[in-house]
Amino acid sequence: TRTFVLGKADKRVEEAFNAVHEIYRRALSKVRAGVKGSEVYMEAVKTAEELGYGEGFMGRERGKVAFIGHGVGLEIDEPPVIGKLPGELSENMTVAIEPKIVFPRYWGVGLESTLVVRSEGYEVLDKSPLDLVEV
């Protein structure tokens, strides 16, 4: 996932995008073999709340989800779910981390990268820039 806007992004979009980028960065700082997925998720939730985006983090109302990522393998979305559920990240596991902030009126910002979990961190598999793209 990358975020695109038509024309120049207004201040509200830029601020939200900067927040989702910080949430992404802090969530990734927790990723390594042996860490519980819930630790990665809770770091993201805590950061979203600190930055004032707790309400729209990972959706709104009935569309809100309690995870920030998932496994990638034979299917695009597969276990493990990186959220409130128990489960540990294992070395060489392939996962996607995808924080999003959703606003009323159907717009939002998000980032997603696919990673390989390593003993001391992770390796990002996709090399697309993480910038807000103005078209």
Image (cartoon, rainbow, N blue to C red):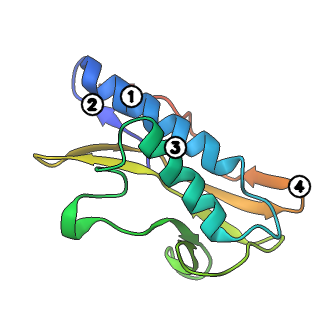
Q: Is residue 57 above or below residue 53?
A: below
* Mark closest to the chain's N terminus, 2 or 4: 2
Name the residue at 42% across, 69% down.
Answer: 66
Q: Mark 2 touching mark 4, by CB under 8 A? A: no
Residue 127 visible in the snapshot: no
Which residue is label 1 attached to? 133
- SS class of the residue under badge 2? strand
Q: Mark 1 touching mark 4, by CB under 8 A? A: no
**What is the spatial separation of the Cα atoms under label 2 and label 4, in whole angstroms?**
36 Å
Image coords of residue 50 (percent x, y): 47, 38
* Mark closest to the chain's N terminus, 4 or 3: 3
**What is the spatial separation of the Cα atoms under label 4 and label 3, in whole angstroms?**
22 Å
**What is the spatial separation of the Cα atoms under label 1 and label 4, in whole angstroms?**
31 Å
Image coords of residue 23 (percent x, y): 53, 42
Which residue is label 4 attached to? 120
Label at residue 5 = 2
Based on the displayed image, in which of its 4 quarters is residue 110 positioned? top left
In the foreground, 104 or 134: 104
Q: Is residue 61 left or right of residue 82?
A: left
In the foreground, 52 or 94: 52
**What is the spatial separation of the Cα atoms under label 2 and label 3, in whole angstroms?**
24 Å
Q: Amino acid at mark 1?
A: Val
Is disc 4 surrounded by few (<14), some (14 to 19) or many (20+) residues within 10 Å?
few
